[in-house]
Amino acid sequence: MLILSGMHTNFSFKNLFSTEKAFVEDYFSKDAKLGKIQAIVNRLNADETLEVRVEKFVKKSAYKVSLILQKPIPSFSSWASEASSPCLTAH
C-alpha cells in the first residue's frame, strides 16, 4: 500500500512480470499522475483508498487498468439492554 498525503493507494496485479509491476507502481506513485486525484480526494475525505488494478492479457498483448476510488466503510457494533432488542450503531 502506498500513502500519498492522506489518500491510500493499493495495487493488485494479474499476469504481470515483476518488472511490469515495478513500472506500474512507479508510474502511479508520481505526483504528476495522481496529484489531481489526490488533491480532490484529500479535500473531500482523505481516508479514501484508490485501488489500481492491472491485468495483462498475454494472448492479445493487451492490458486492462482499473482505477477504483473506495470510501471507508463505517464500523458497526451491536448492543442490547435488558428492556430493549439489539440495535446497530455506527462508530
Image: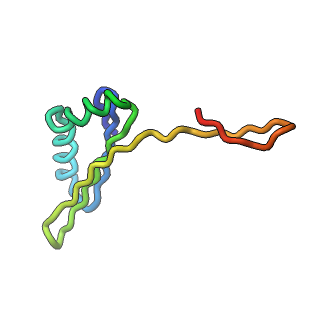
Q: In this view, which residue lies farthest toward the bottom? A: 59
Looking at the picture, how far across and down is residue 83, in whole percent? Answer: 86, 37
Residue 54 location, quadrant = bottom left
Front one among 83 and 53: 83
Quarter of the rendering occupied by the N terminus? top left
Looking at the picture, how far across and down is residue 86, in whole percent? Answer: 75, 43
Identified at 38% across, 31% down, the residue is 45
Identified at 27% across, 49% down, the residue is 67
Q: How many marks?
A: 0
Looking at the picture, how far across and down is residue 31, in whole percent? Answer: 18, 32
For this view, does 57 lie left or right of residue 72? left
For this view, does 14 lie left or right of residue 63? right
Looking at the picture, how far across and down is residue 36, in whole percent? Answer: 20, 34
Identified at 58% across, 32% down, the residue is 91
Identified at 28% across, 30% down, the residue is 4
Asked if 63 appears above or below 43 in the picture, the reply is below
Residue 34 location, quadrant = top left
For this view, does 58 lie left or right of residue 11? left
User: Colour scheme of this structure image?
Assistant: rainbow
